[in-house]
Amino acid sequence: MKNQKALFLDRDGVINVDHGYVSKKEAFEFTEGIFELLKHYLQEGYLLFIVTNQSGIGRGYYTLDDFQTLTQWMLEVFEAKEIAIQKVAYCPHAPEKNCHCRKPKTGMIEEIVKAYPVDLSASWLIGDKQSDIDLATHANIPHTIAIGNHEISGASYQFASISACYRFLKENPNLTK
């Protein structure tokens, strides 16, 4: 199998509204436009991956089981909408652990590339924090989208919301071809 282009997504702030340490489906609110955006990338032949720091586990705010239960529910919602997420890679460590998997370090991307035929040079990353865009830079993912109204440097594009990002990509279809 030849290497495929991929879309790497942060979770909190990109897939769902970041309400701070979201660990239960009752607090999980999908961002407006996320389903349409992911379907756009799927139609263009991208594999979809989620890469998320989950320091709430390491800090004791919620358990690994809480995270896995929520993740399974989220994946089922995507599946019901015919959106296939290949893998959810996560870092459960608190920042002070200085692990290899916490963004902006590249451990989660390396884990994915070992298991899936991904062409990083043709891939995109969407995030809402500087550490997301820095991860893309460190992993040699050239195309990045920052979400939010705060300053994030180094992104290829920046939009206030996922909906605005989706509208732009629909109006500029050659970007993701």
Image (cartoon, rainbow, N blue to C red):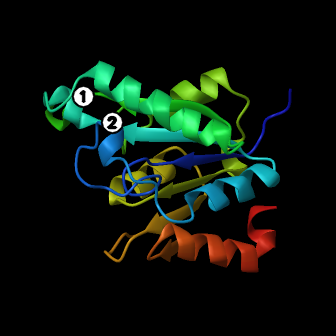
On the image, the x and y values in percent for residue 26 come to 32, 43
Of label 1 and label 2, which has the lower sequence position? 1
On the image, the x and y values in percent for residue 15 come to 47, 52
Asked if residue 5 is positioned above or below residue 162 in the image, the reply reads: above
Taking the view exactly as shown, the residue that stands out farthest to the right is 1
Q: Which mark is residue 57?
A: none
Taking the view exactly as shown, the residue that stands out farthest to the front is 26
Q: Is residue 96 left or right of residue 169?
A: left
Amino acid type at image mark 2: Arg
Where is mark 2, residue-wise?
102
Asked if residue 77 is positioned above or below residue 86 in the image, the reply reads: below
Which residue is at the front of the view, 137 or 24? 24
Q: Is residue 100 left or right of residue 2?
A: left
Which residue is at the front of the view, 138 or 13? 13
On the image, the x and y values in percent for residue 60 come to 13, 27
Within 10 angstroms of label 2, few (less than 14), some, or many (20 or more) residues? many
Location of residue 157 (image quadrant): bottom right
Quadrant occupied by the N terminus: top right
Q: Is residue 143 left or right of residue 2?
A: left
Which residue is at the front of the view, 13 or 125? 13
Tag 1, which secondary structure?
Answer: loop
Q: Are marks 1 and 2 in contact (CB under 8 Å)?
A: yes
Where is mark 1, residue-wise?
93
Q: Is residue 89 left or right of residue 77?
A: left
Location of residue 68 (image quadrant): top left
